[in-house]
Image: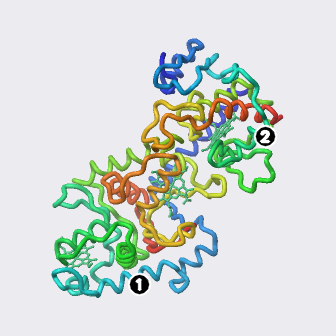
Amino acid sequence: MKNYALPLLGMAALSIASLTVPADAKADELVPFKIVNGNSIPASLTGKAGDPAKGRDVAINRKKGNCLACHVMPIPEQPYHGEVGPDLNGLADRLSEGEIRLQLVNPKTNNPATIMPAFYRTEGLHRVAKNFQGKPMLTAEEVEDVVAYLMTLK
Amino acid sequence: MRKNNRKIMMAGAAVAAVFSIATIAAGEPKSGYLSAEPETQAMQDDDFSNPAMLVTDYGGDLWSTADGDSGKSCEDCHGDAADSMKGVKTRYPTYYQPWGKMINLELRINECRKDNQKAKAWKYESKEMLGMASYIGYQSRGMPMAVDIGGKATPFFTKGKEFYYERRGQLDMACSHCHEDNSGNMIRANLLTEGQINGFPTYRLKWSGVGTLHRRFKGCNDQVRAIPYERGSDEYVNLELYLAWRGRGLAVETPSVRN
């Protein structure tokens, strides 16, 4: 298993064992991370804890997380919350930090058919616009900031 | 706990998918009109308040204006558009023998200009093309969309369908993720519809003007950060054929008004 960008193959391998994703040449902009039990990335991508206040901003920002496009969140000052995905209120009571991190990094690991974008993935995509080629939707720091914010949703 | 949640969600998604397929199989597609704000619907309902009628009327003027080396107007050859162009929109895109592939209404207008009127092709998104495509489409208002996907059209239909279900862009989404799986759901401030095409060319409040269907395709590609195709490209014409089929039976609303 080399490529975590192939969700189906990934699922098969993941169900057998945990796996380390190598930072191969093509994905060299991404830091390596380790998926455990097929449903969790327990370790911080940056090795540090994120900043929840910044993470909240990333979740609102239409050019960054834009999580509000699809999720209801406890962000009352923003008028429009989408209903494509589940309400994220109380999320940290249902999911562990590692499970949340994996859901952000690549939700296709959990559900290959999902509409939710992978926020930390660059491989296996089709016809990406020039300005965004080879770039993940969020940086590792931003992923950690959002994880830190989501962990406050109890 | 988590696994249970996931299962419920997946089951929900499966039910939703089955439901939308059933809706389509039953031939009951829903026009974007039904999800529009009442004020937007009212603009479309009344030709005098429909801002797209200015463009449509301009198309009507062009219809009877001589052009090109033939020195003829569309009307000189086709007569009254209310008769000759009635129902034309409902069968486009259609298989076009000289090209061996599909042609849509905009491209067909240009073919006729070049071949018969001996005039220069109009730019795809020009005022002239928007006017003429709206004017010809308007002659089919209220008639059911009825493209033919059999025979030589079938391989192009299949390509259009593949396009519809193919993920693209940095956001990695297919048309189906928004317009099939989530029609009826809010995506931030927007209410997702089935993405039907029965109203094009359409006046969009966001554009403050009339635009072609292929302009809308480009917008829906851009918003998932995907490389769009050219307007009038084979890819978009095939996609148009597939969508016309999904919307078969819907009344033509050209020129519609949308958010």
Identified by mark 1, the residue type is: Asp
Position in image of residue B214 (x %, y %): 40, 60
- Pointers 1 and 2 within a single chain: no
- Chain letter of mark 2 equals A
Position in image of residue B241 (x %, y %): 35, 57
- Visual colour scheme: rainbow
> Which residue occupies the foreground of this view, A86 or A81?
A81
Is there any visible trace of residue A138 in the rendered image? yes
Position in image of residue B154 (x %, y %): 27, 51
- Disc 1: which residue: B57
- Circle 1 crowding by C-alpha within 10 Å: few under 14, some 14–19, many from 20: some
* Drawn side of residue B134 relative to residue A64, left or right: left
Identified by mark 2, the residue type is: Asn
> Which residue occupies the foreground of this view, B256 or A50?
A50
**Residue positioned 83% across, 34% down in the render:** A154
Instruction: Pick the quarter of the image with the C terminus of chain B.
Output: bottom right
Q: Are marks 1 and 2 in contact (CB under 8 Å)?
A: no
**Residue positioned 72% across, 35% down in the render:** A146
Mark whose residue sits in front, 1 or 2? 1
- Circle 2 crowding by C-alpha within 10 Å: few under 14, some 14–19, many from 20: some
* Drawn side of residue A133 relative to residue B245, left or right: right
- Asked which secondary structure carries label 2, the reply is loop
For residue A89, the mark is 2
User: Where is B140 relative to B26, above or below?
Assistant: below
User: Where is B27 relative to B69, above or below?
Assistant: above
User: Where is B24 relative to A58, above or below?
Assistant: below
**Residue positioned 51% across, 24% down in the render:** A28
User: Where is B251 relative to A75, above or below?
Assistant: below
